[in-house]
């Protein structure tokens, strides 16, 4: 990753407690992971799909690259750190199988910090450490490879479910998937184009139209599809 992005970014990622995988991927422990292990409470995925939160992992294969720069984004952006890099294009992609192995290793490392919580020891469920993967910023890269985008099959081969989140700006990539995720989320974070441009700050032309194209595509998917929003309490853009 050092060769692709400035060191300042790597440090910011580590500070935010991300576990890096290979050259451009990262996983992060979610709030519910902790809740499941320490308080026995899991997120909605447990109720609807039987997925334990401590066996679910949230990750992005392209943590520094996206077609938008949302004001509320969880990723480090160049304006946050006063450094610049090409946020639109990740030039060199790791092999999907290596990333998946890295995800499993990262989850084991995170779990090793909770050895005392035997009540929810993943080994007692007879299931692997990683049962489900929440994938963000998976398609939002102009030059991502077909090889990577068809890698849902690799997750399926390991009996893992996949929940894919997309901002909908690249509908051709979505319609070109050779295999569907377990569930597909499209982020719809603005009620109209004007707010969309101010809040989501798209970096590609025609992003609002593309988002609407993506929404029209949803009915062609067999997996459950969801429109998700990020709600912000106060106005966060300047007039
Ligand atoms: S679409 Fe998601 S990853 Fe991209 S800038 Fe917006 S919040 Fe961040």
Image (cartoon, helix red, strand yellow):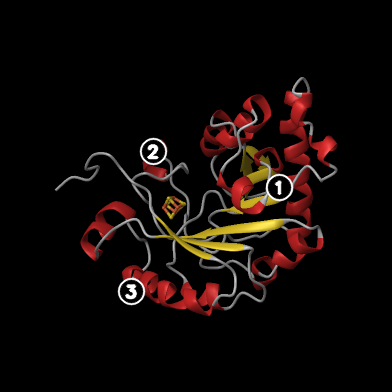
Q: Nearer the viewer, residue 25 or 85?
A: 25
Q: Would residue 1 be visible to someone looking at this image?
A: no
The residue drawn where x is 84% and y is 35% is 124
Q: In the rendering, at what x and y percent does residue 86 appear? A: 47, 55
Secondary structure state at the residue bearing disc 3? helix
Q: Please state which of the two labelled residues, at mark 3 or mark 2, is closer to the viewer.
A: 3
Q: Earlier in the sequence, mark 3 or mark 2?
A: 2
Q: Please state which of the two labelled residues, at mark 1 or mark 3, is closer to the viewer.
A: 3
Q: Residue furthest front?
A: 47
Q: Nearer the viewer, residue 56 or 236?
A: 56
Residue count near mark 3 (Cα–Cα under 10 Å), binned few <14, some 14–19, many ≥20: some
Q: Would residue 71 be visible to someone looking at this image?
A: yes
Find residue 207 and report its image quarter: bottom left
Q: In the rendering, at what x and y percent does residue 71 appear? A: 33, 46
The residue drawn where x is 48% and y is 77% is 219
Q: In the rendering, at what x and y percent does residue 210 appear? A: 38, 73
Q: Is residue 114 above or below residue 51?
A: above
> Is label 1 in contact with label 2 (beta carbons under 8 Å)?
no
Q: Which residue is mark 1?
A: 22
Query: Does mark 1 have its CB less than 8 Å from ligand 1?
Result: no
Query: Does mark 3 have its CB less than 8 Å from ligand 1?
Result: no
Q: Nearer the viewer, residue 123 or 119?
A: 119
Q: Which residue is mark 3?
A: 209
Q: In the rendering, at what x and y percent does residue 48 appear? A: 60, 52
Q: CA distance from mark 1 to mark 3?
A: 34 Å
Secondary structure state at the residue bearing disc 2? helix
Q: Which residue is mark 2?
A: 80
Q: Earlier in the sequence, mark 1 or mark 3?
A: 1
Secondary structure state at the residue bearing disc 1? loop
Q: CA distance from mark 1 to mark 2?
A: 24 Å
């Amino acid at each position: 990753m050092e060769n692709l992005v400035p060191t300042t970014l790597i440090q910011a990622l580590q500070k935010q407690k991300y576990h890096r995988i290979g050259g451009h991927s990262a996983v992060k422990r979610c709030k519910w992971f902790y809740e499941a292990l320490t308080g026995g409470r899991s997120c909605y995925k447990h109720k609807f799909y039987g997925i334990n939160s401590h066996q679910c992992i949230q990750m992005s294969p392209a943590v520094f690259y996206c077609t938008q720069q949302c004001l509320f984004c969880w990723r480090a952006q160049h304006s946050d750190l006063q450094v610049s890099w090409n946020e639109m294009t990740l030039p060199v992609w790791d092999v999907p199988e290596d990333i998946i192995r890295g995800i499993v290793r990262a989850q084991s490392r995170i779990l090793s910090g909770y050895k005392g919580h035997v009540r929810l020891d993943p080994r007692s469920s007879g299931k692997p450490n990683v049962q489900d993967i929440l994938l963000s910023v998976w398609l939002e890269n102009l030059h991502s490879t077909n090889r990577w985008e068809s890698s849902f099959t690799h997750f399926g081969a390991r009996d893992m479910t996949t929940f894919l989140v997309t901002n909908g700006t690249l509908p051709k990539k979505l319609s070109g998937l050779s295999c569907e995720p377990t569930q597909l989320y499209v982020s719809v974070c603005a009620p109209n184009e004007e707010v969309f441009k101010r809040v989501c700050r798209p970096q590609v032309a025609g992003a609002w139209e593309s988002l609407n194209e993506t929404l029209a595509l949803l009915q062609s998917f067999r997996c459950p599809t969801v429109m998700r929003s990020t709600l912000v309490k106060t106005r966060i853009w300047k007039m």
